[in-house]
Image (cartoon, rainbow, N blue to C red):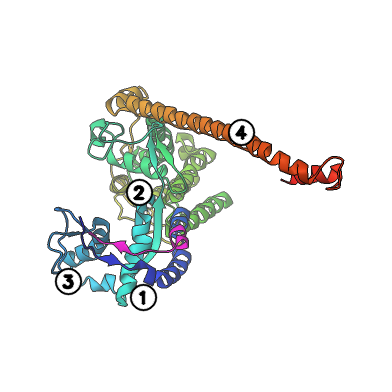
Amino acid sequence: MDTNHIFLELDKLQPEVETFFQESAVAGVWSANGKSITAGWLKGGLQPRSITRDMKWGTAVPLPGYEEKVIYSWFDACIGYVSITACYTGQWENWWRNPEDVRLHQFIGKDNVVYHSVIFPATQLGTHDPWTKLHHLSTTDYLTYEGGRFSKSRGTGVFGDSAQKTGVPSDVWRFFLLSVRPETGDSEFAWDSFISANNNLLLKNLGNFGSHVLKFISSGHYNNIVPDWLTYHEPAFGTSKEEVNVLLAQYIRELDAVKLCSALSTVLQISQRGNPFLQSSKLDNYLRLKEPAKCAAVVGLAVNLVHLLSCLLNPYMPETAQSINTQLRAEPLPISDRWGADSIPPNHEIGQAAHLFRRINPEKVEEWREMFGSKEAEKLKVEAAALKAKKKNASKKTGVAKTATGVEDALETLAIAAPTLEAQCPVNGSGGTPADGEEKLNDR
């Protein structure tokens, strides 16, 4: 059945889209896969694209003659970014028609790159109005599940609406998922890695350091009062502080470039400076009794590092950051270019120390695998491998058959051509020497 549709004439906008892409991808430091997918589309040449569908569900086309059609969902969805802002505030133009002052960052899976890097910008460019266009594109690859694919229909994988069944705090989920975010290639969700991240990276690293410092202050040594730590100094303290500031600058650069995994790893590197600092300074009851000034200085620097960590963790683990600040009885610390180690002053009273994280029993691995379809994921993995092998074998057989047919055809051709060649190039005749005949046959 013939039907009429509305098309976005992308071909006419290609020069403008290419200019936009070249400028924005550099200025906004797009992720590598986002750039390569967009470049591939432009290299192939943009074609007119239908933006309407013959469907019942969707946004109706507001034009006469198209009453039975709806707008294509991905054309509609990107415009929805603007319209939902307009529903939220009457000042939406301050955000969407302000390219000089507003930078648009978008986070998407690689399947949907073209809608955000080509089609929506082309729509904006086609109006010739001053729209705020894409500045940074953060594109992710695939996150697999236990070696297979996430699939709601087949019950494989843990999803947001069922993660709470594990009883694991949401911040731990945030930490792990961001630590394996597929920013530069596919990555995997595995239950043993999930539990290891909680027990080793969070509990033994960050959790132990924070608990050690806060419990030491809340003990009978200081009775929750931060001691006067400004009267004692060692060169090693300044070195430790400068090392943290180097990592802080790295963290800021990584966040500015939307390298979320790397920035989170840098937070852990800063935290990892904490426990060795306490150990090398020998923070214990003996130090408190024999060298009280040094002990106070160690505690003062360490408690300020705990406060810094709450600030750096806040974009990733807001509840953990809030818990740290509550225990410190301190306001959230803004992210600054340099760490002065002075946000928690002497005589500041902290609150009750508490554990930030709890150990997860490794035996939970099998329970959660059973609950969230890891066996089905393994089955899908095996099926996919078998299908791949079958296709490979079929391709080989087809190749052998084609080769055999090709040889037969060649032999038949040579058989037909031989008398002619022999007539033209007799071994002992005037048509040429044997060498000439052989060369011509070989050339053919």
Q: Earlier in the sequence, mark 2 or mark 4?
A: 2
Query: Considering only vertical position in the picture, is 109 above or below 12?
Result: above
- Disc 3: which residue: 90
Query: Element under label 3?
Result: loop
Q: Is residue 43 magenta?
A: yes
Query: Considering only vertical position in the picture, is 317 above or below 76?
Result: above
Label 2 vs label 3: CA separation?
A: 31 Å
Confirm or deny contact between disc 1 and disc 2 (CB under 8 A).
no
Q: Is residue 268 magenta?
A: no
Q: Nearer the viewer, residue 97 or 35?
A: 35
Query: Element under label 2?
Result: loop
Identify which residue is drawn at 39% across, 51% down: 110
- Disc 1: which residue: 100
Where is residue 227 shown, x and y percent of the image?
Answer: 40, 48
Q: Earlier in the sequence, mark 1 or mark 2?
A: 1
Where is residue 375 shown, x and y percent of the image?
Answer: 34, 24
Q: Which residues are magenta?
A: 39-52
Label 4 vs label 1: CA separation?
A: 70 Å
Amino acid bearing label 2: Tyr
Amino acid bearing label 3: Gly
- Disc 2: which residue: 316
Is residue 444 something one can see in this rendering?
Answer: yes
Label 4 vs label 3: CA separation?
A: 77 Å
Q: Earlier in the sequence, mark 4 or mark 3?
A: 3
- Disc 4: which residue: 408
Q: Residues within 10 Å of mark 1 (few under 14, many from 20)?
A: few
Label 2 vs label 4: CA separation?
A: 67 Å
Q: Which label lies toward us, 2 or 3?
A: 3
Rendered image quadrant of residue 408: top right
Q: Which label lies toward us, 4 or 3?
A: 4
Where is residue 126 shown, x and y percent of the image?
Answer: 32, 73
Q: Which label lies toward us, 1 or 2?
A: 1
